[in-house]
Image (cartoon, rainbow, N blue to C red):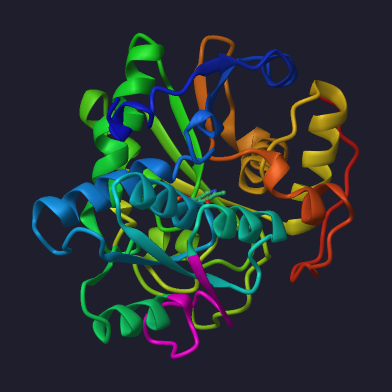
């Protein structure tokens, strides 16, 4: 069986708890059913296939990527399956579970100070690019600027959602990290029907909400809340603002609380950024203004078992924002 046959075709499930709470129809695109257990297997596969097809790497060569963990794992697993190797630059905020998975997948890993983009010498992106440039037969997949990132979601995630909803979708909501998911799915959905709402979610302090609204960077760039996989202090090339209507910001503490409450009430352990998407519903329900006939699709990129130490066992990181604590029942 070809590796491409294992990636994608993930289920879309109705979420009774959220649908009841918000008096609408809420569906979850469960991306943790991919082989590497995250949505990022899709761009990983597209970027690797593209590099091989364009002869950017010879057999046995080394794929290099900067990743918060999930893309890295997709790259490592697919590279191994195809007879290549992987070196992944992760930032020190990456969960222990993801580091363990990368090591088990045979990736060489290097931990960096931050993932603040190519202009920062200590970032995962800069270190990955420099490493690939100075090593023969190494190829930097560069998910933040590789057009295959958006394309993977445009060609696979979005058509799956369209088919699974029978074209009856009114809203799509997903977390934004590189921007590949929201831009690829957003573009496809807007091409089918421009009135479909495409909404992103990012941590408090991240700059993409401001950029989307004003098309400039904010004057003050502050540290963003540490919600793994989402949030940026630069505008990635994989973020296409033309297909996104709005970006909601949520904070670390409410995201953690939502994850724990969701687990207690549904027995489903959701990933950090998935919890952020659920938190956006709670915080902005009035603005979102769903009706009983809306069909809302939330994308859950990965599973909570990747964040037991940080999200479900107390965690160690400090939030940057002050939090609004409210009680919440699903
Ligand atoms: N959630 C998680 C857990 C992720 O790993 C990522 C990818 N960094 C995202 C959300 C954001 O997806 P994208 O990069 O496509 O914006």
Asked if residue 229 shows in the view, the reply is no
Nearer to the camera, 27 or 95: 95
Classify the position of the N terminus by image quarter. top left
Residue 138 as seen in the image, left or right of residue 111 = left
Residue 198 location in percent, x, y?
41, 37
Q: Is residue 117 magenta?
A: yes
Residue 266 location in percent, x, y?
79, 22
Asked if residue 330 shows in the view, the reply is yes
Classify the position of the C terminus by image quarter. top right
Give the image quarter of residue 125.
Answer: bottom left
Residue 107 location in percent, x, y?
48, 62
Residue 207 location in percent, x, y?
50, 68
Q: Residue at x 33, y 19 (%)?
A: 162
**77 up-or-down from 329: above or below:** below
Residue found at the very far bottom of the displayed protein: 121
**99 up-or-down from 138: above or below:** above
Give the image quarter of residue 21.
Answer: top right
**132 up-or-down from 18: above or below:** below
Q: Residue at x 16, y 62 (%)?
A: 58
Instruction: Please name the predominant secondary structure of the magenta segment in the image.
Output: loop
Q: Residue at x 61, y 68 (%)?
A: 205
Start and end of the magenta stretch?
A: 108-124
Q: Is residue 114 magenta?
A: yes
Q: Residue at x 32, y 85 (%)?
A: 130
Give the image quarter of residue 143.
Answer: bottom left
Nearer to the camera, 220 or 157: 157
**288 up-or-down from 70: above or below:** above
């Amino acid at each position: 069986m070809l590796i491409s046959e294992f990636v994608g075709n993930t289920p879309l499930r109705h979420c009774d708890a959220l649908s009841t709470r918000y008096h609408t129809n809420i569906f979850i695109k469960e991306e943790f059913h991919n082989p590497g257990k995250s949505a990022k297997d899709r761009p990983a596969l597209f970027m690797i296939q593209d590099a091989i097809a364009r002869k950017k790497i010879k057999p046995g060569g080394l794929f290099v990527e900067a990743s918060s963990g999930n893309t890295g794992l997709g790259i490592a697993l697919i590279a191994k399956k195809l007879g290549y190797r992987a070196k992944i630059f992760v930032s020190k905020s990456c969960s222990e579970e993801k580091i363990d998975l990368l090591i088990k997948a045979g990736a060489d890993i290097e931990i960096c100070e931050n993932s603040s983009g190519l202009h920062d010498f200590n970032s995962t992106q800069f270190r990955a690019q420099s490493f690939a440039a100075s090593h023969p037969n190494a190829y930097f997949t560069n998910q933040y600027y590789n057009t295959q990132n958006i394309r993977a979601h445009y060609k696979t995630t979005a058509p799956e959602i369209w088919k699974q909803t029978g074209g009856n979708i009114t809203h799509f909501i997903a977390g934004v990290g590189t921007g590949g998911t929201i831009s690829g799915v957003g573009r496809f959905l807007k091409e089918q029907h421009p009135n479909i709402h495409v909404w992103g979610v990012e941590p408090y302090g991240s700059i993409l909400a401001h950029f989307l609204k004003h098309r400039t960077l904010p004057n003050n760039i502050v540290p963003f809340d540490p919600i793994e996989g989402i949030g940026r202090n630069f505008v990635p090339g994989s973020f296409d603002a033309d297909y996104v209507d709005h970006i909601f910001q949520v904070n670390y503490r409410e995201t953690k609380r939502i994850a724990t409450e969701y687990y207690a009430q549904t027995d489903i352990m959701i990933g950090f950024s998935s919890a952020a998407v659920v938190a956006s519903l709670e915080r902005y329900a009035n603005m979102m203004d769903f009706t009983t006939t809306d069909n809302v699709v939330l994308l859950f990129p990965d599973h909570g078992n990747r964040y037991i130490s940080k999200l479900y066992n107390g965690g160690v990181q400090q939030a940057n924002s002050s939090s609004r604590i409210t009680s919440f029942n699903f």
